[in-house]
Image (cartoon, coloured by chain):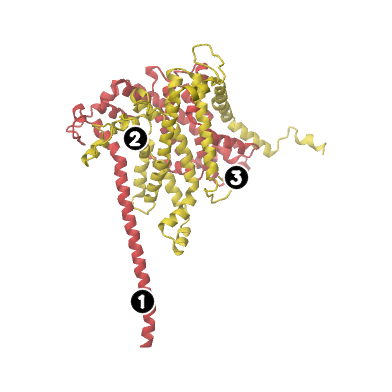
Amino acid sequence: MSASTTAKAPAQERANTARSLRSQKWNDRITRLGALALVILFSIVILLPVAWMLSTALKTRLEVVKYPPIWIPAELQWSNFPKALTFLPFATYFRNTAFITATVMVADVLMNSIYGYAFARLRAPGKEILFYVVLATMMVPYQVIMVPQYVLFHNLGWVDTFKPLIIPAWFGSAFLIFLLRQFYRGIPPELDDAARIDGCGYISTWWRIMVPLSKPALAAAAIFSFTYNWNDFTAPLVYLNSPDKLTAAVGLAAFRHRYGATPWELLMAASLVAVLPCILLFFFAQRYFIQGIVVTGVKG
Amino acid sequence: MTEIAPKQSGFKLTASRREALAFYAMISPWIFGFIVFLGGPLLASIYYSLTDYDVVHTTNFVGLENFITMFTGDKLFWQALKVTFTYAVMAVPLGIIFAMFLALLLNQKIPGLALFRTIFYLPSVIAGVAVSLLWLWLFNPTLGLINTVLRSIGIQGPMWLLNERTVIPSYVLMSLWGVGASVVIYLAALQSVPTELYEAASLDGAGPARRFRNITLPMISPVILFTFITGMIGALQIFTQAYVMSDRGRGGPHYASLFYGLYLYQNAFRYFKLGYASALAWFLFIVIMLLTLLTFKLSSDRVFYQSGGRG
């Protein structure tokens, strides 16, 4: 008898602990469910504008101004796309944009990889100071150097050519130098030390060891370079004037200012075509996007 | 001593000197570009800011006249400052809070994390003119999606971009749509906080609110500082949105969306007052430097670096 009563107390305690653990588990589950519901809600809110863009791009002009608005047009107006793209010479604009973006991307990946490697691995007096200069240039807004750079390129006769948009890229981008340097610092130094001991020079160590090992970071750099230049507006607006030299972004802005904002279905169709490459790139290479952001944002 | 010195400084390269030489050889294009495309123009623009340079006429040295005009005779300069700072003061903190909120939600071990992260980040990859056009359409008072949704729940929506009072909040709202990059950064930072800290705090009886304030916030404070500074610099140079969304890119209605970047652009490339625009640019640069320094100073005892010295 006495044995069973003494055994009762710990059993009670165990039951209590089990109950509190269970309620803890329930609490966790409710928190997670609430979080999930909110996340789904915000996802819908974030996606709605894009869906609205697509919906508008496929409507007739009458459906666009119809009240109350409809989400799915009676007949999908795919012809809005060719119509929008021939309204202004968008084919030329896209070709120009693709050319500038691709050229800059090659320069960005190649050159900043060399700069990033030098800053990550080589020892030299004054390197720290120079690296702080690199970081400081990230803080300089484009608008501050826009005017003096314009004067420089004007004097060089580069205005209304692609040169002001392409050539500076070869001399490095602070953000990409930083991104790649952070990545190279995470590669075990034994690997390139071994190559150096085998008699490789610095350039061939970079090319044969660092480049193959840093493909994800180089992909991230390429993607950032692509989206930045594809979407860039200010510099092309400042430097390009001739109608046959404009980029897609400048062409879109001209479209809006020339026709007001009435042909919404055409504006949205042209906008969709303009954002499509970035969206596709993002879906196929998003882990590089995420990785790049995390490397520069968290480990900074 | 004196006999050894010349030998060392002779032609024989030590390994460390060769390494230093290689370093400077590899980054020499960057140094060249820094001087020619950034440092040089930046210094040259100090000179331009003291002239009436306009590409066409002969340039005259005017001393501090541009700056005096800016501060005493140019109402639009003050308007542009007001617009830009009103926007930054709203958009930057709200952006941080909203991004943090979304990151905390994503960090609750919910299923489908990768999918939701993708959705949240999506607006960040399509920045620029197309997105400005999209929001121009969303904000349309009669036909736009936002007022349509509001009307369906019985609210008469505002005029958004067409009203002086609501135009800046409209830009803020639009900026919140693009906080995805910050969400990704915060989420990574949250995931890097050691779980032992939370377990220890729970055992000591700390609830979720206290755990957030005393563990999460200090641990991710460097990341918050980073997003605050980059967000502030970004907010002070808003240009594309205002150029595309305001009528004829003039910053209307009645200069209520005349952002500093837009005003600078107009002076430089619409009126070709490049001297005056240089003065405007330098003022913006100084403001940004001072704000950045101030942020570092004010935050130095509030930001916690886990590894000590490295900032």
**Disc 3 from disc 2: Cα separation:** 57 Å
Can I make out residue B260 in this image? no
Q: In the picture shown, does residue A63 fall above or below A22?
A: above
Chain under callout 3: A
Image location (x, y in percent) of residue A119 = 58, 38
Q: Which chain is yellow?
A: B
Q: Which residue is mark 3?
A: A194
Name the residue located 53 percent from the left edge and 39 percent from the top edge: B294
Up/down of A14 relative to B156, above or below: below
Which residue is at 45% across, 21% downward?
A: B267
Identify the residue under disc 1: A12
Residue type highlighted by circle 2: Ser
Judged from this view, the residue extending furthest toward the top is B57
Disc 1 is attached to a residue of which chain?
A
Vertical placement of residue A218 versus B48, above or below: below
Give the secondary structure at mark 3: helix
Callout 2 touching callout 1 (CB < 8 Å): no
SS for dot 2:
helix
- Counting every numbered tag in the picture gives 3
Mark 1 element type: helix
